[in-house]
Image (cartoon, grey):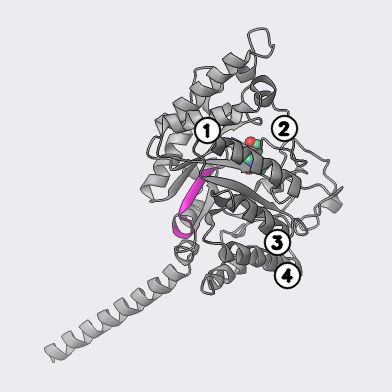
Amino acid sequence: MQVLKKTLMITTVCCFALTACKKSVIEESNRLANAFADKFLIGTAMNSLQIFDLDTLGTDIIKKQFNAIVPENCMKSMYLQPEEGKFFFDEADKYVAFGEANNLWITGHCLVWHSQAPRWLFADENGNDVSRETLIERMRNHITTVVSRYKGRIKGWDVVNEAIMDDGSWRQSKFYQIIGEDFINLAFQFAHEADPDAELYYNDYSTAIEAKCQGIVNVVKSIQAKGLRIDAVGMQGHLNMDSPTVEEFEKSLLAFADLGVKVMVTELDLTVLPGFNNFTGADVSANFDFKAELDPYSDSLPDQVALEQQNRYVDFFKLFLKHHDKISRVTLWGVTDNDSWRNGWPVPGRTDYALLFDRNYQPKPVVAELIKLTKQY
Ligand code: 9MR
């Protein structure tokens, strides 16, 4: 009797263990990071709440679903060095520690960007533009200080962000006006000197516009012609429901890959809200007044629109998977719909549904569709 009881107990324990094991196998395969493991890295931006561990449901998703991270805001120069020589690394340190603790590919964003740069960077004590030499020196100091701090830990850097306009011309930023075209080459040189092993990227939005794509191709060629390191072009994926087309995106993707660099789809999101005046892109300085008709889904998203969004996400991921040999990483610009900058841009106060996880931290049906899709490539 005793033996029988023992056997029954062992069998029951084994059954439980088997079920638990099966369940965890299923759960494992239901994760984006696992499904895309042999294709490309799949990442997300991390916001301050997540970095300071004040959004544990959000960080749980990051740990389970993604294998790469990028800081949405905390490494921008106005936060890292708000006053000359005064660096604040608290949040950036936590961000990097989170990535290391969870074995994630850690990207730094972004060393040189016209936006979110502190005013002092370009100005002398009278508020006039500094000399070319001074700005080069300030840029060198910023890049060297930041990149050296995370040497060997941050695996890749968005070195220059958004230097080219939609028509392919140079953005008339302070970096460009004061230093000239060479600011890009110098930025890549300084970053490489600070961490020779780090990957270095050029990152921009609306890269599917032909003229802009050509402008970026010229930038990459000029970096390469100087013998400087550049590993990838980041195509920010701030998509609308009707633009760009998958074909337009593919054309640019191939143009960048032809340069011998990798392509990364960075900052991926897909707004379902009405645009207007053919306004696209991701110029953060753009702003339009709130009107109720511009915010049609403030209560919930109709099933039909959700399905259309899902189909468009799937179409883009089909493209990414088709070219997975050229793509090193695809990164969502946030975890849940609630986190998305799209809720506030270019019209403040709207309710958008741009990401893969909903406001209750649940995966949208598109997540399972994307996982299924990986098996076909
Ligand atoms: O998502 C970011 C938002 O929270 C910030 O307010 C904004 C300005 O710093 O930047 C947003 O991220 C931008 C990214 O850094 C560069 N490409 C465009 C992104 C969306 O504006």
Q: Please rate how many residues cluster around mark 3, counting C-alpha atoms within 10 Å: few if below 14, some from 14 to 19, many from 20.
A: some
Q: Which residue does the image show at 63% across and 38% down from the upper left?
A: 219
Disc 4 secondary structure class = helix
66 in magenta:
yes
Q: Earlier in the sequence, mark 3 or mark 1?
A: 1
Question: Alpha carbon of mark 4 to alpha carbon of mark 2: how far?
Answer: 40 Å
Question: Alpha carbon of mark 3 to alpha carbon of mark 1: how far?
Answer: 30 Å
Name the residue beneath numbered marker 3. Answer: 246
Name the residue beneath numbered marker 4. Answer: 303
Q: On the picture, is 126 further left or further right than 336?
A: right
Which quadrant of the picture is home to ligand 1? top right
Question: Alpha carbon of mark 2 to alpha carbon of mark 1: how far?
Answer: 18 Å
Q: The disc labelled 2 sits on which kind of residue?
A: Arg
Q: Nearer the viewer, mark 3 or mark 4?
A: 3
Residue lying furthest left: 2
Residue lying furthest top: 126
Question: Is residue 267 depicted above or below 109 in this figure?
Answer: below
Name the residue beneath numbered marker 2. Answer: 171
Q: Please rate how many residues cluster around mark 2, counting C-alpha atoms within 10 Å: few if below 14, some from 14 to 19, many from 20.
A: some
Disc 3 secondary structure class = helix
Answer whether residue 207 is visible to the viewer in this image. yes
Span of residues in magenta: 64-71
Q: On the picture, is 145 further left or further right than 348?
A: left
Question: Alpha carbon of mark 3 to alpha carbon of mark 4: how far?
Answer: 23 Å
Q: The disc labelled 4 sits on which kind of residue?
A: Asp
Disc 1 secondary structure class = helix
Q: The disc labelled 3 sits on which kind of residue?
A: Val
Name the residue beneath numbered marker 1. Answer: 188
Q: Nearer the viewer, residue 6 or 256?
A: 256
